Image (tube, rainbow, N blue to C red):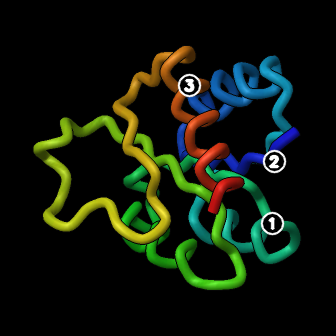
């Protein structure tokens, strides 16, 4: 099954989404910051990264740009509490597959995740 890195500074979101993803059969690692995510990705790749757009130490656009560079290339789903119209101009970029609005609906998350992984395998 696919490996997923889940990145959010809210432990409640990490816990609930990790449960949903593991129940669906995914191998899930978690990080609470961009720095921790970078360290985990340098140690072992992930097929997909699900990250908060507004982490304390990195913004979603920066993370998307980093993930688009070799050797990484995981698919990226960003989550935000902001309305789509409130995102900064030019967001998202790089490796971003889609932006999901918090609170994330579990069925929507799994559907989008499956599409992102299928597209990644096809590329």
The residues bearing labels 1 and 3 have C-alpha atoms spaced at a distance of 22 Å
Please report whichever mark, 3 or 2, sits nearer to the chain's N-terminal start: 2
Which residue position holds label 2? 3
Give how far across and how far down residue 70 sits, in percent.
Answer: 65, 84
Element type at marker 3? helix
Give the vertical position of 36 relative to 100 (above or below): below
Give how far across and how far down residue 83 sits, in percent.
Answer: 19, 36
* Mark 1 vs mark 3: in front: 3
29 or 24, nearer to the observer:
24
Which mark, residue 111? 3
Local packing at callout 1 (Cα closer than 10 Å; few below 14, some 14-19, many 20+) is some
Which residue position holds label 1? 45
Give how far across and how far down residue 75 sits, in percent.
Answer: 59, 56
Disc 2, disc 1: CB below 8 Å?
A: yes
Give the vertical position of 114 relative to 78 (above or below): above
Please report whichever mark, 1 or 3, sits nearer to the chain's N-terminal start: 1
* Mark 3 vs mark 2: in front: 3
Local packing at callout 3 (Cα closer than 10 Å; few below 14, some 14-19, many 20+) is few
Give the vertical position of 17 relative to 77 (above or below): above
Q: The N terminus appears in which quarter of the rendering?
A: top right
Give the vertical position of 123 relative to 8 (above or below): below
The residues bearing labels 3 and 2 have C-alpha atoms spaced at a distance of 16 Å
Q: Is residue 31 visible?
A: no
Image position of 49 (left or right of 82): right
Residue at 85% x, 26% y: name it. 25
Residue at 67% x, 63% y: name it. 37
Residue at 59% x, 59% y: name it. 33
7 or 74, nearer to the observer:
74
């Amino acid at each position: 099954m696919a490996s997923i890195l889940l990145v959010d500074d809210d432990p409640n979101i990490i816990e609930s989404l990790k449960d949903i993803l593991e129940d669906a059969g995914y191998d899930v690692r978690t990080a609470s910051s961009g720095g921790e995510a970078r360290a985990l990705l340098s140690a072992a790749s992930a097929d997909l990264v699900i990250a908060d757009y507004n982490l304390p130490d990195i913004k979603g656009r920066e993370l998307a740009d980093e993930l688009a560079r070799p050797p990484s290339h995981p698919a990226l789903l960003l989550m935000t509490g902001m309305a789509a119209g409130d995102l900064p101009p030019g967001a998202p970029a790089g490796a971003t597959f889609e932006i999901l609005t918090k609170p994330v609906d579990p069925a929507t998350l799994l559907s989008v995740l499956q599409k992102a992984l299928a597209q990644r395998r096809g590329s």
